[in-house]
Amino acid sequence: MRRLTLPDSAAAGEGAIRHAPSAARNLEPIAAILAQYLPASGRVLELASGTGQHICAFAERFPALEWQPSDIDKAALASIAARIAHAPRANLAAPVALDACRPGWAAANGPFNAVCLSNLLHLISAPEAETLLAEAASALAPGGRFCLYGPFRRGGELVTEGDRAFDASLRAQDKAIGYKDIDDIAATLLRFGAVEIARPEMPAGNLMLIAERPIQA
Ligand SMILES: C[S@@+](CC[C@H](N)C(=O)[O-])C[C@H]1O[C@@H](n2cnc3c(N)ncnc32)[C@H](O)[C@@H]1O
């Protein structure tokens, strides 16, 4: 796992609980889009759950869904577990260690009615992103949805000055990582059987992309 210096990164809170100001800021806009596109019931996997702020709020907001948090990082898993211990819910499972870039996790853990992912694709390489997207698409049950949030290139371009600075700082730390293009992401998902159904604009120049595995392939 890469150790990157990120702006606005998670800070220690009470006990193992970690808190990321960015996760607090983007929670409501993401939840508003999820309310439109999540299935009414079923299992939802969140990849790279981080501090657990998002999934704990989503489990409360969408009580008819069964939520499964995951992350690759021990400190993140401890934070998620501590948040759940603080406010347990019947529809929120214990976090599982899951490397989203490792081939095979979909078959081992799926199927899911939705897979959510926020703020990871710019932190991994293009081959890692391709594996993640292939696994996410194949983890979806028929009619299941992949809900992706983050910063992206558009038409190959970095749009804002903030995006240019952030992408440059990532590439300075590891030249294999950095912003991915949203059209490439949609095309890759389609190649693996998940069809784009929406691409909502989000605050701060970010995007969501919702893709669905068709009921009849
Ligand atoms: C920038 S944080 C985003 C956390 C959360 N999704 C959010 O938006 O607030 C990136 C997260 O990805 C996790 N991560 C990094 N590489 C990963 C991988 N290969 N598989 C799963 N999680 C990974 C990190 O441990 C970290 O929790």
Image (cartoon, rainbow, N blue to C red):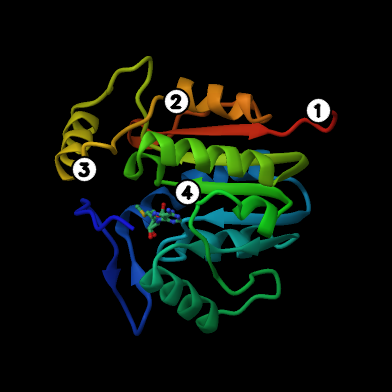
Q: Amino acid at mark 4?
A: Cys
The quadrant of the picture showing ligand 1 is bottom left
Q: CA distance from mark 2 to mark 1?
A: 23 Å
Element assignment for label 1: loop
Q: CA distance from mark 1 to mark 3?
A: 38 Å
| Of pointers 1 and 3, the one earlier in the residue sequence | 3
State the residue at coordinates (47%, 20%): 183
Residue under label 2: 182
Q: Earlier in the sequence, mark 4 or mark 1?
A: 4
Residue tagged 4: 101
Q: Earlier in the sequence, mark 4 or mark 2?
A: 4
Q: Secondary structure at mark 3?
A: loop
Q: Nearer the viewer, residue 93 or 1?
A: 1
Point out residue 47 in the picture as x, y percentages from the top left corner: 52, 54
Residue shown at 62%/48% (left/top)? 115
Question: Is the Cβ of the residue at disc 3 closer than 8 Å to that at disc 2?
Answer: no
Quadrant of the image for the C terminus?
top right
Return the residue at label 3. Answer: 174
